[in-house]
Image (tube, grey):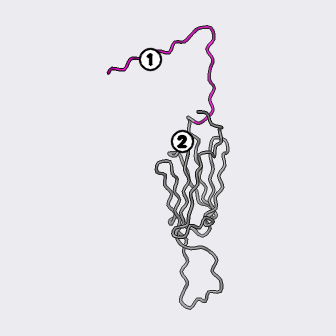
Amino acid sequence: MLFNNDPFRDFDTVFRRVGTGASHAMPMDAYRRGEDVWVHVDMPGVREDSLDINVERNVLTIVAERNWTPEEGDRHYLSERERGSFRRQVHLGDGLDAEGIEADLTDGVLSLRIPVAEKAKPRKISIGVGGQTAIEAEATPA
């Protein structure tokens, strides 16, 4: 079966905030540039040591923690910034190299560089001229 070569066809995003199902806590952009797919996730206020990124069975999982503890005597006037644990999952298609992922957290933005797998890169197919090439199959012992 043939498919249109859409680099994001295999990005199946599943996102939720632990416990509530909120999706806006970790907004994400993803795009292909050259031979890499780039993913940028906004996570202001998240420290590097509270961030966990892993890949299992082609599912990239990002877990982050953002907390603030008020001091004794603080009076709250407004509390709109979300706190707690956040989780975002992205299904990586077979055309991406999960082993080569690189991550960087700068200015509250997590940037992931995911290389396109060699098998997914375009390649030239040579055409034989003149002779015939036989394809031989070996009998499999029963």
**Which residue type carries mark 1?**
Ala
Q: Which residues are magenta?
A: 120-142
Residue at figure coordinates x 56%, y 57% from the top left: 14
Relative image position of residue 60 (x, y in whole percent):
52, 53
CA–CA distance in space, label 2 to label 1: 28 Å
Relative image position of residue 130 (x, y in whole percent):
62, 8
135 in magenta: yes
The label number, if any, that marks residue 96 in the structure image: none
Residue 139 lies, with reference to residue 80, above or below; the image says above
Q: Residues within 10 Å of mark 1 (few under 14, many from 20)?
A: few
**Residue linked to disc 1:** 137
Residue nearest the observer in this picture, 9 or 25: 9
**Residue linked to disc 2:** 94
Q: Tell me the quarter of the picture where residue 66 sits.
A: bottom right
- Mark 2 touching mark 1, by CB under 8 A? no
Q: Tell me the quarter of the picture where residue 36 sits.
A: top right
141 in magenta: yes
Residue nearest the observer in this picture, 65 or 8: 8
Residue 7 lies, with reference to residue 136, above or below; the image says below
Residue at figure coordinates x 66%, y 46% from the top left: 32
- Most distant residue in the bottom direction: 73
Residue at figure coordinates x 53%, y 89% from the top left: 72
Relative image position of residue 107 (x, y in whole percent):
64, 64
Residue nearest the observer in this picture, 14 or 70: 14
**Which residue type carries mark 2?**
Asp
